């Protein structure tokens, strides 16, 4: 039994001085191709308190054995499903090299999967606003206290995520890898280093399939404008010519967002940006969209998910197919590209729904706007998902696959389960080969119509003249 396990089994022995350089190791494994803000904020919080944490982003740099061996506390950032799968591999490696280290996970998927993570991989998990709980837990470890810490769950006790508003420090990016090693904006044949920041935490909305909802339950917090702007300023000095605003929904606080964009444009008129927002917010704030375009917005990520009214209703998405069409028109009129995110495979999806989605993408000339992997996305139902609160869920829900971090389910139409696997294979192969999106889409379309037992129809595209690929980031989107 490791020292960490012994500590959780009874009174915790003081872990000793954690202020030494590298005694606290923060690890990120995957954050959508951007320099991890989920490292930069806790780095700043811990450093201000007198600690000397080391941060490693395994997406772009190696995590060496020496750093693991020197660590007494290892905290792994897991804001999404892919990050958690990679994070558990890091945890296993840490346990092998340094069995006495106290290992934890923080982020949305940490708290959702707390039972499994604490049993199999770690000693603590933190959800919600994680900076203050992490600092308090480090202090408790140093003092040998075994009292519960707000926002931190261990094997001995479970506590809800902390939603107490924190005093946001300036993100500490100086020790992180250069942003030139991360995603670039691809626009007009040019690659521009892309920075990343957030203006809010949480989300006002409660879409049933979203992992933000079980943690924040409709709440969101604004990050102070001066913190966001100084973070942007520092990234621009390091070479960023584009900023991704990675809020779950940038227009949860439209006035806050607009003020930040105005200030950024006034200081850096050459810097462009992208944002993520709901279809209904594009419609509600349509009068703001032209100004966002003038301020440098080149594309908007929006969770279209599906064009099936049944699917949209079952996940309580808050928009219709007609709304998507209108949102496309609003953005196109302003000269902003939409980059839809999709959820094409759900327990309610029919084969006709999938074919309708492909027809929609062709009809509205969106092939180049969608990373092919999106056509393969399958609904994840993590522990704690709001979908579990719906009584009708028991009609399709299977057992929890803890190691995969999701409840299982099967489509009523077995052809769709097989098609999902084939589309995933096509998308992955196309990505690996650097294949043109149109070619990958054609293969996906052929697979879908073949699965449906139908003849593959010819391509349908609007006559827009010369093909002009819309702005995008060089990192394909994975959840």
Image: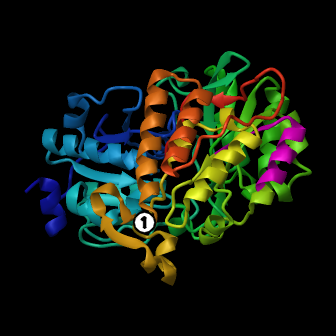
Name the residue at 37% across, 41% down: 26
Name the quadrant containing residue 55.
Answer: top left
Q: Is residue 318 above or below residue 122?
A: below
Rendering coords of residue 351 (x, y %): 55, 57
Name the residue at 47% across, 69% down: 385
Residue on which the image places disc 1 = 151
Front residue of 169 and 96:
96
Name the residue at 61% across, 36% down: 196
Q: Main secondary structure of the magenta part?
A: helix
**Residue furthest out toward the top:** 189
Is 219 positioned to the left or the right of 212 in the image? right
Rendering coords of residue 303 (x, y %): 65, 52
**Residue furthest out toward the left:** 1
Determine if residue 30 is in view: yes
Rendering coords of residue 145 (x, y %): 26, 65
Name the quadrant containing residue 134.
Answer: bottom left
Are there few (<14), some (14-19), or many (20+) residues within 10 Å of tag 1? many
Q: Is residue 235 above or below residue 166?
A: above
Q: Which residues are magenta?
A: 324-340
Is 466 positioned to the left or the right of 211 in the image? right
Front residue of 189 and 228:
189
Rendering coords of residue 424 (x, y %): 44, 42
Name the quadrant containing residue 149.
Answer: bottom left
Which element type, helix, strand or loop, lies under badge 1? loop
- Residue 434 painted magenta: no
């Amino acid at each position: 039994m490791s020292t960490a396990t012994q500590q959780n089994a009874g009174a915790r022995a003081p872990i000793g001085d954690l202020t030494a350089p590298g005694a606290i190791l923060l690890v990120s494994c995957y954050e959508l191709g951007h320099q991890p803000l989920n490292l930069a904020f806790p780095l700043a919080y811990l450093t201000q308190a007198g600690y000397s944490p080391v941060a490693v982003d395994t997406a772009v740099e190696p995590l060496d054995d020496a750093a693991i061996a020197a660590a007494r506390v290892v905290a792994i950032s897991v804001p999404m499903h892919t990050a958690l799968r990679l994070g558990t591999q890091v945890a296993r490696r840490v346990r092998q090299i340094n069995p006495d280290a106290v290992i934890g996970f923080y982020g949305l998927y940490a708290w959702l999967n707390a039972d499994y993570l604490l049993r199999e991989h770690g000693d603590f998990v933190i959800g919600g606003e994680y900076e203050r709980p992490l600092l308090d837990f480090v202090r408790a470890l140093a003092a040998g206290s075994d009292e519960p810490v707000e926002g931190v769950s261990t094997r001995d006790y479970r506590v809800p995520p902390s939603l107490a508003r924190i005093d946001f420090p300036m993100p500490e990016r100086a020790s992180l890898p250069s942003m030139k090693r991360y995603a670039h904006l691809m626009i007009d044949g040019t690659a521009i280093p892309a920075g990343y920041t957030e203006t809010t935490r949480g989300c006002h909305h409660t879409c049933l399939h979203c992992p933000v909802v079980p943690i924040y339950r409709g709440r969101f917090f604004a990050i102070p404008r001066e913190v966001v702007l100084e973070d942007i300023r520092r990234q621009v000095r390091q070479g960023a010519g584009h900023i991704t605003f990675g809020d779950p929904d940038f227009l949860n606080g439209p006035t806050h967002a607009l003020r930040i964009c105005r200030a950024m444009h006034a200081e850096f008129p050459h810097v462009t940006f992208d944002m993520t927002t709901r279809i209904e917010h594009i419609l509600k704030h349509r009068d703001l969209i032209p100004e966002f375009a003038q301020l440098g917005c080149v594309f908007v990520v929006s969770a279209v998910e599906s064009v099936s009214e049944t699917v949209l209703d079952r996940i309580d998405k808050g928009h219709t197919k007609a709304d998507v069409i209108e949102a496309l028109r609003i953005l196109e009129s302003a000269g902003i590209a939409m980059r839809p995110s999709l959820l094409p495979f759900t327990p309610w999806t029919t084969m006709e729904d999938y074919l309708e989605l492909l027809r929609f993408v062709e009809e509205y000339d969106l092939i180049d706007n969608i990373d092919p992997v999106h056509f393969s996305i399958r609904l994840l139902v993590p522990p704690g998902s709001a979908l579990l609160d719906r009584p009708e869920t028991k009609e399709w829900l299977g057992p929890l696959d803890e190691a995969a971090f999701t409840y299982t389910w099967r489509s009523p139409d077995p052809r769709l389960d097989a098609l999902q696997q084939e589309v995933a294979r096509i998308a992955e192969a196309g990505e690996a080969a650097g294949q043109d999106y149109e070619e990958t889409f054609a293969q996906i379309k052929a697979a879908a119509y073949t699965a449906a037992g139908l003849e593959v129809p010819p391509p349908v595209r609007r006559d827009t003249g010369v093909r002009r690929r819309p702005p995008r980031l060089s990192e394909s989107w994975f959840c």
